[in-house]
Image (cartoon, coloured by chain):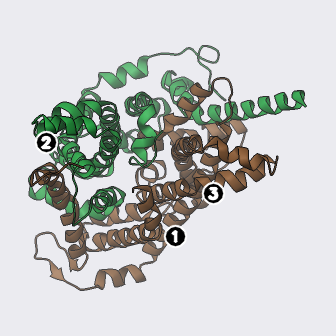
Amino acid sequence: MALERRCTRWVWFAVALAVTALVALPFYWAISLSVRNPRDTFTVTGLGVPFVQYRPTLDNWRTELGTWETQRALANSLIIAVATAAVVVVLGAPAAYAVARFRFRRPSNEDITLWFLSQRVLPPVATAIPLFLIVRWLGLLDTRTGLVLLNVTFNLPLVVVILRQAFIDLPVELEEAALVDGAGHWGIFLRISLPLVAPSLAAAVLIVVAFTWNEFLFALMVGSLNAKVIPVHIAGAGDTRGVQFWFVAVRALIAITPPVILALLAQRYIVRGLTFGALKG
Amino acid sequence: MHREGRIKLLFILPAVAWVLCFTVFPLVYGVRLSLYNVKVGAADEFVGLANYRHFLEDARAWASLAVTLVFVGCGVAAQLVLGLALAVLFTRAMPLRGVMRTLLTAPLFATPIAVGFLFVTVFYEEGGLVNGLLGLKVPWLSHPTWAVVSVIIVDVWQWTPFCFLIFLAALGGIPEDCYEAARLETKSGWALFRHVTLPMLQPTVVLVLLLRITEAFKVFDIPFTLTTGGPGTATQVLTMYAYRTGMRFFNFGYASAISVVVFLMVTGIILVLFRRIRQVYQ
């Protein structure tokens, strides 16, 4: 009986290990491709273990990171993501606090929350053409400002809903005591409540940065040249270079690595973030 | 709740104004565009429901709709089942659990456009990872059916971790007492799962369904790079069809009509699941 139980335990452990290996395989494959000399691409077969099957090289990385187009795309992506996160927090945090702490009658607090939530659920393609025309009308085509404006729009509801839950989870007594002491609502919000939700705020910012970094449809429509970001930079590769595995792998990893690292940093808060505060992770 | 006057409006109005300007207004504007024939360099011409009538007669639109529904249906179903199975597996104590959990989370935030490109090399017929490892000759990207399968596989790879994480969190929230009481009745693990775990998870399943279905309808990046909608138009999902109609052929009116159709479908699904979701947020 005990032996049998130990056996099943190891079987399940093996299954978990196998699934994890399968999920991680594409990442491994990308790394393996990215450090291959181009002439080894098709001669090395199977899993392509570096050092065993071929001599790894960093040349592909050096070439790709050395071009100014890649550097500019990286800079654009970074600036747009950080600026988006900043604007979203400035607009979203007070709104989240209001929905969490003040009583609204018509529409009610729940209605306001769901209204924000529904904006996030909306398929972007429904507003893609009008937003393109609006950005063009504002004269912001192919500018970083235009892309920040769009990304703020997509991420604002997310941040409102995440932070709302964080504010609700705070004990209200602290704020009430401060109110009795004569502090104003803005003072309480800025000096007491906001610092207390710092972990959720950080998680929300990481998620917004990752989403903005990954956004492609609008980046493609609005930023084709000067405001070209990493995903658009990558998408242009297929047309001109065909399928050059080592090259695809390097570029894919350049794009994938930052958001994946951010996600791992925010791991504890991801569940809450992705369910818009409905579930605690 | 605080007692307050007008100040609450100052907190909330900037965000509301932003959403009204850049989400609600464009949506209304999009509906208006869908009723017009929009030409570059000429005044818009009102055509009533002509764009929608065109949609009904457009074989490509129907094909896109079919691909989208297959993609959403199969993809989300697979993610839900696999995610739940994985989550149940990971409730067991085992070595390396934290490390494996972290690795399983990784695909979630990987840039979709880059993932699409990467999987071109994974599914490449000659010298790609899958065919190379398994000694197969499956035309993953050049056969219409296999191309749809490939797109679904990539989506499942990327989004199963999402279902996994949420179910894992929800499983952790089920009180142990429920199981203890049920164990008096049965010893079968399946019966416990069927009669305790599943009913307790029901709100979570609805939530995951809502989030995944609405997100899956937005799919664009993966087919854009992995298959470029092809071969032919085999993987041209509705968002891609709308994008091409609008941005390649500058037929803004018809593209808006397609977008409105997508929007109405997603809204319909939300309304069906809405009452359940409302309970979650109260």
Q: Which chain carries label 1?
A: B
Cα–Cα gap, marks 3 and 1 = 32 Å
Give neighbour class at mark 1: few <14, some 14-19, many 20+ (Cα, 10 Å): some
- Chain letter for brown? B
Does dot 1 land on a helix, a strand or a loop?
Answer: helix
x, y percent for residue B135 = 72, 39
**Residue B127 in view, yes or no:** no
Position in image of residue A46 (x %, y %) = 67, 29
Same chain for labels 3 and 1? Say yes or no: yes
Q: Name the residue under label 1.
A: B66
Residue assigned mark 2: A185
Q: Which of marks 3 and 1 is in front?
A: 3
* Pointer 1 with pointer 2, Cβ within 8 A: no
Quarter of the image holding residue A21?
top right
Which residue sits at x=56%, y=46%? B167
User: Could you tell me which chain the residue with mark 3 belongs to?
Assistant: B
Q: Which of B275 and A245 is in front in this view?
A: B275
Question: Relative to residue A182, is residue A96 drawn left or right?
Answer: right
* Residue where numbered disc 3 is placed: B199
Name the residue located 71 percent from the left edge and 50 percent from the top edge.
B193
Q: Which of B232 and B68 is in front in this view?
A: B68
Q: Colour of chain A?
A: green
Q: What residue type is labelled 3?
A: Pro
* Mark 3 residue crowding within 10 angstroms, few (<14) / some (14–19) / many (20+): few
Amino acid type indicated by mark 2? His
Q: What residue type is labelled 1?
A: Ala
Can residue B257 be seen here? The reply is: yes
The numbered mark 2 sits on a residue in which chain?
A
